[in-house]
Amino acid sequence: MKKTIALAAVTSMLIFTACSKSSDSSDTTTTANATEESADDAAASEDATATEETDNVASADNTVLEITLKGGDDMKYDQTTLKATAGQTIKLTLVHSGKLPKASMGHNFVLLKNGVNETDFATKALAAKDTDYIPASAAGDIIAHTDLVGGGESSTIEFTAPARGAYTYICTFPGHSAMMKGKLLVQ
Ligand SMILES: [Cu+2]
């Protein structure tokens, strides 16, 4: 029993020493947590809950969501469901994990606005070979898109997650959208 108390005392001393020696962010976090706990003890649970909710919202808005989506020579995306929070910055990298060139097995990621018919859009894209199958006439249908990439290449884009909902993404290389499509679920 005495040993335990002694150990606890030593530990406290160590923590105290560490805190007083440096003022980096991890120590600040520790202090903040301790304060929240004492608030809980003082039966100020409502206030504590409110604080936590505010913190969650703030962190969701500030966090950049990094997504790596792969497409291979098998004409498939490795993920057909992606998730994000409305308003969040999404940094998406499309990686062509295959070996075939862009001309025969090109891939892109095109995120469509709600209500856009993906088949109609893909048909317009067919005629847009000169612009890597991104049809200028339907630019208003697109939330974001990557470049068209071939085997071993990648393309990174940043965009803001749209309002809550389910959004379709496709590859607009001719014949690919039937196989290469998925949903971005925004909450
Ligand atoms: Cu493709």
Image (cartoon, grey):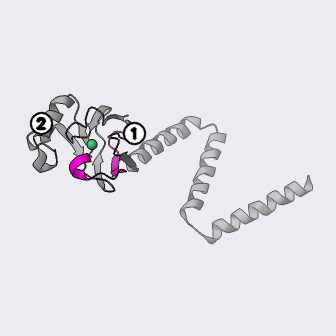
User: On the image, which quarter does residue 26 sit in?
Assistant: bottom right
Q: Mark 1: give few (<14), some (14-19) or many (20+) Cα within 10 Å.
A: some
Which quadrant of the picture is home to ligand 1? top left
Residue 93 among those drawn in magenta: yes
Residue 93 in the image, given as x and y percentages of width and height = 34, 51
Q: Nearer the viewer, residue 152 or 163?
A: 152
Residue 92 in the image, given as x and y percentages of width and height = 34, 49
Q: Nearer the viewer, residue 16 or 186?
A: 186
Q: Mark 2: give few (<14), some (14-19) or many (20+) Cα within 10 Å.
A: some
SS class of the residue under badge 2?
helix
Residue 16 in the image, given as x and y percentages of width and height = 69, 64
Tell me whether the residue at label 1 lies in contact with that at label 2, contact meaning CB atoms closer than 8 angstroms. Answer: no
Identify the residue at horizontal 63%, vertical 40% (top origin).
Answer: 40
Q: Nearer the viewer, residue 87 or 111?
A: 111
Point out which mark residue 124 bears.
Answer: 2
User: Is residue 150 visible to the viewer in this orientation of the structure?
Assistant: yes
Point out which mark residue 79 bears.
Answer: 1
Identify the residue at horizontal 61%, vertical 44% (top origin).
Answer: 39
Bounds of the magenta segment: 85-106
